[in-house]
């Protein structure tokens, strides 16, 4: 028993020593020549991108000290905090070793033990929240340091010194700020670090539509084209596409665009990047003639697990690689709407509760599979009680094939805008901050375009009705049962984006929560009337002072150049471009 007790004591002491040990590694900056060097590591624990600062030892050598045993990490990489980085290094971290990196995601090499003067006792400051966080009104930043070091800081952009403010309490920020710190140990060892925080400029919601520089609903007043689209669908075998839309990528141009969304605005970009396939709608196109409504939806692939599988280049991220749902919500009659709930209390295609519900004027829902021609797609209309129903009178089928897909990106799409970083706060989508062009991230063939041909008779509308009254459409992105994204934007798909899924905490609860859509559809044929505004001015009103509204019917004090507005004079109105 004594030997067993001593063995346990020895093991506990060893474990405690291992946990509290400080491990220093070094980085050879002679090739990358970065002005600053950061380390990003992941798995257990994980840093927030871009990581933590290294400290300069000499002209080419930088050092970093872990305050834990890093042997459990899955990987590390080095970067300059401004976009350039090395490749992942997953061979394990060794104390005292120096690692040489190559930029442009080049290899990291273990050069062996560092032969120079070892660095010990470098203090490391940690900020909560991490550098790069954005905030809406104000933010409180808490600093802590290893080695019981004193912290000095500045907020005016100057470097911190021992004459700067001594940190004794959390810092309150109300504007975009860089917090520069200096940590000083009792032995006089110092280390400088910086933490940056950006205040959002949120974009107001107009008429339940979000119009930023990147989200655009009916841009420049475009409502689709009154023309026939040469939609041709061909069944294919031994191919998960099942049905190819032969002409899809040549059928559509920017003139047909009715809604421009953004990429990476699905819950998986915030939590669950490892999940495939990826269903992320980016843009909607529309046209109509005397017989059919034609729709095109561009889906993009810009969400991937950077530190696991990387970018998928074998096509498994395609929406049609699973039996997923494609949902189109229509507003056909301005006087009707339904929630999309069956009489049994469940939502359509669900047997265990409510997931996707509507309070935005939706009165028709198309449910179909991401694998064209699989299953029985249905157009659901409200029954006399206002419920959705599988009864053939209220659930109409269209003979297949009436939709299909094609691999690729529509040629008229010159940019794919999306948030630069994964794991962002969904509030960032209501700003113009953090967006970059992702079009060069992956070959266009990894995106997917879907095309539909819907008979007007089945929808219960006519060409003249679309032209003179107009209809609306919204695309719902799903993964699992719940919505994980939408075009046009609707905040309901992000209200639980960073909450853990009940069956897998590594992915998002948006797959199973109840979403209630309240934001407006994109319009086809004619914009919806707002605030009693009509389309044509009367002659007797022409001498009255004009009042301007945006396309969502909200009054605008100072119209911007190049944009289309509704100009109201008295009881009449017209569209004008500034």
Image (cartoon, helix red, strand yellow):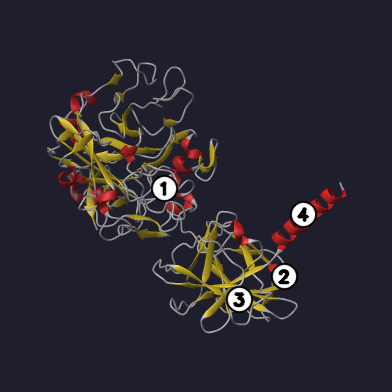
Look at the numbered disc 1 and give the secondary structure of its residue: loop
> Which element carries disc 4, helix, strand or loop?
helix
Q: Is residue 243 left or right of residue 149?
A: left
**Labelled pair 4, 2 in contact (Cβ < 8 Å):** no
- Figure quadrant of residue 572: top left
Where residue 171 sits in the image (x, y, percent)?
A: 65, 65
Q: Residues within 10 Å of mark 1 (few under 14, many from 20)?
A: some
- Read off the residue under disc 4: 12
Q: Which residue is mark 1?
A: 205
Residue 142 found in image quarter: bottom right
Ranked by sequence position, the earlier of labels 1 and 2 is 2
Residue where numbered disc 3 is placed: 192
Query: Does residue 128 show up?
Result: no
Q: Secondary structure at mark 2?
A: helix
Earlier in the chain: of badge 2 and badge 3, it is 2
Q: Are marks 4 and 1 in contact (CB under 8 Å)?
A: no
- Give the percent coordinates (x, y) of residue 82: 45, 69
Query: Taking 72 as reference, is 317 above or below it?
Result: above
The residue that mark 2 highlights is 147
């Amino acid at each position: 028993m004594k030997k067993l007790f001593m063995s346990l004591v020895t093991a506990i002491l060893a474990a405690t020593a291992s946990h509290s040990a400080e491990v220093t590694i070094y980085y050879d900056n002679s090739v990358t020549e970065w002005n600053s060097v950061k380390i990003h590591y992941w798995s257990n624990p994980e840093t927030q991108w871009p990581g933590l600062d290294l400290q300069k030892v000499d002209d080419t050598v930088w050092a970093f000290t872990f305050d834990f045993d890093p042997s459990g990490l899955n990987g590390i990489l080095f970067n300059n905090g401004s976009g350039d980085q090395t490749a992942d290094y997953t061979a394990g971290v060794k104390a005292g070793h120096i690692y040489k990196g190559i930029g442009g995601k080049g290899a990291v090499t273990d050069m062996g033990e560092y032969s120079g003067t070892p660095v010990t006792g470098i203090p490391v400051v940690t900020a909560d929240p991490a550098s790069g966080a954005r905030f809406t009104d104000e933010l409180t930043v808490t600093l802590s340091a290893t080695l019981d070091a004193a912290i000095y800081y500045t907020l005016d952009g100057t470097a911190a010194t021992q004459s700067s403010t001594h940190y004794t309490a959390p810092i309150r920020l109300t504007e975009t700020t860089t917090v520069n710190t200096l940590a000083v140990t009792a032995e006089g060892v110092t280390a400088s670090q910086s933490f940056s925080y950006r205040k959002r400029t949120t974009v107001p919601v107009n008429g339940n539509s979000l119009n930023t520089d990147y989200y655009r609903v009916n841009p420049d007043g475009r409502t689709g084209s009154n023309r026939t689209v040469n939609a041709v669908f061909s069944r294919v075998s031994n191919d998960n596409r099942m049905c190819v839309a032969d002409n899809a990528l040549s059928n559509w141009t920017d003139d047909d665009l009715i809604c421009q969304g953004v990429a990476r605005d699905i819950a998986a970009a915030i939590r669950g990047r490892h999940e495939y396939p990826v269903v992320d709608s980016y843009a909607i196109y529309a046209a109509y003639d005397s017989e059919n409504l034609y729709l095109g939806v561009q889906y993009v692939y810009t969400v991937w697990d950077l530190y696991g599988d990387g970018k998928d280049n074998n096509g498994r991220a395609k929406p049609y690689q699973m039996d997923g749902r494609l949902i189109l919500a229509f507003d056909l009659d301005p006087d009707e709407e339904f929630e999309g709930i069956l009489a049994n209390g469940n939502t359509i295609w669900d047997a265990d509760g409510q997931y996707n519900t509507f309070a935005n004027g939706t009165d028709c829902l198309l449910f179909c599979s991401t694998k064209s021609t699989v299953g029985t797609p249905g157009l659901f209309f409200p029954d006399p009680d206002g419920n959705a129903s599988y009864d053939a009178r209220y659930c109409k089928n269209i003979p297949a094939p009436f939709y299909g897909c094609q691999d690729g990106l529509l040629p008229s799409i010159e940019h794919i805008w999306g948030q630069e970083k994964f794991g962002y706060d969904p509030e960032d989508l209501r700003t113009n901050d953090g967006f970059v062009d992702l079009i060069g991230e992956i070959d266009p063939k990894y995106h997917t375009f879907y095309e539909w041909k819907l008979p007007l008779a089945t929808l219960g509308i006519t060409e003249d009705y679309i032209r003179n009254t107009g209809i609306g459409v919204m695309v719902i992105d799903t993964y699992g049962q719940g919505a994980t994204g939408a075009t046009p934007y609707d905040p309901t798909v992000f209200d639980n984006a960073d909450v853990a899924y009940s069956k897998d905490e590594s992915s998002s609860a948006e797959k199973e929560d109840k979403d209630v859509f309240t934001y407006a559809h994109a319009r086809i044929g004619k914009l919806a009337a707002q605030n009693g505004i009509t389309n044509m001015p009367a002659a007797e009103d022409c001498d009255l002072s004009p009042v301007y509204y945006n396309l969502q019917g909200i009054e605008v004090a100072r119209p911007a150049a190049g944009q289309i507005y509704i100009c109201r004079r008295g009881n009449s109105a017209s569209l004008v471009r500034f």
